[in-house]
Image (cartoon, rainbow, N blue to C red):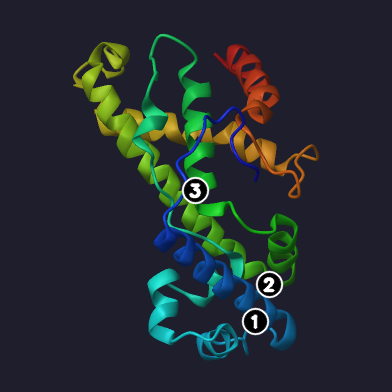
Amino acid sequence: MRKTRGMSSTVLPSLRDRQKAETWLTLHQAAVASVLERGLDSATVETITARAGVSQRTFFNYFPSKEDAVLGLRTPVMDPALLEGFSFHRDVLGQVSRLLLAVALSAYEGVDQVRRRELTRQYPHLVHRMVERMNEAEDLVRSALTGLLAENPQWFAGMGEEDQPADVADVARIVVMTASIPLRFTVASGRYSPAAGLAPDDLAPALSLFHSVQRKLL
């Protein structure tokens, strides 16, 4: 997945941040090399750290598991700046879908996407770990949306049963689940290239189709 288009100038990382990034990349590359050389089962944390020249304690400061190191996965994060300009007065589905993409990118970016896909094809159970990270990203977005909805109760007023109004957390959950459909559809489509990755504009065709289908269903 490629970086979000149209980003403004960024602050240069500190020496400590650069060193941490280099250690993270060294461990990831060592994990991939160990899997290619030995196979996933034989590529242990011990063999990975020996190849990387660091301690096992250092390994677990960067990755919670061998699978995360092999895939180059990070814990997803929610940048508060992503919520700036969010509005319930325009295309909520599109905004939440793009928010999901941005948070997912924080977990998936920075590695060879083609190699990652090759590894998941060779070891299908690795996909489970990627799904878990996506679920974590959805949890972050759902939590943020719950807060936004709590500040805008008029948006979901009248939802739910007459004697039991919809709960704000439930509304946030179903919105996020719905908004994940265009993202998953785009990734699964033939138009998606692991080498090129995804940017917010790439969701436009799926969002347009979703809106058209939704109008027919209602």
The residue carrying mark 2 is 123
**Residue 64: mark in rendering:** none
Query: Which residue matches tag 1?
Result: 40
The mark that comes first in sequence, 3 or 1, is 1
Q: Amino acid at mark 1?
A: Leu
- Answer whether labels 2 and 1 touch (C-beta < 8 Å): yes
* Label located before the other in sequence (2 or 1): 1
Whole-percent x, y for residue 49 in the image: 52, 85
**Residue 106 bears which disc, if any?**
3
Q: Give the percent coordinates (x, y) of residue 129.
A: 53, 63
Residue 47 vertical position relative to residue 66 in the rendered view, above or below: below
Task: Determine contact: label 3, label 2, CB under 8 Å.
Answer: no
Question: Looking at the image, which residue is at 51% across and 38% down?
Answer: 102
- Could you tell me which secondary element the residue under label 3 belongs to? helix
Q: Nearer the viewer, residue 62 or 126?
A: 62
For the residues labelled 3 and 1, the Cα–Cα distance comes to: 25 Å
Q: How dense is the environment of label 3, judged by Cα within 10 Å: few (below 14), some, or many (20 and up)? A: some
Measured in 3D between alpha carbons, the distance from the residue under mark 2 to the one under mark 1, in whole angstroms, is 8 Å
| Callout 3 amino acid | Ser
- Cα–Cα gap, marks 3 and 2: 23 Å
Badge 2 element: loop
Quadrant of the rendering where the C terminus is positioned: top right
- In the image, is residue 40 above or below residue 127? below
Of circles 3 and 1, the one toward us is: 3
Question: Which element type, helix, strand or loop, lies under badge 1?
Answer: loop
Query: Which amino acid does the dot numbered 2 rest on?
Result: Tyr
Coordinates of residue 137 in the picture (x, y in percent): 44, 46
Q: Residue at x 74, y 44 (%)?
A: 196
- Where is 192 relative to 200, above or below? below
In percent of the image, x 40 and y 9: which residue is there? Answer: 89
Of circles 3 and 2, the one toward us is 3
What is the crowding at mark 1: few (fewer than 14 residues within 10 Å), some, or many (at least 20)?
some
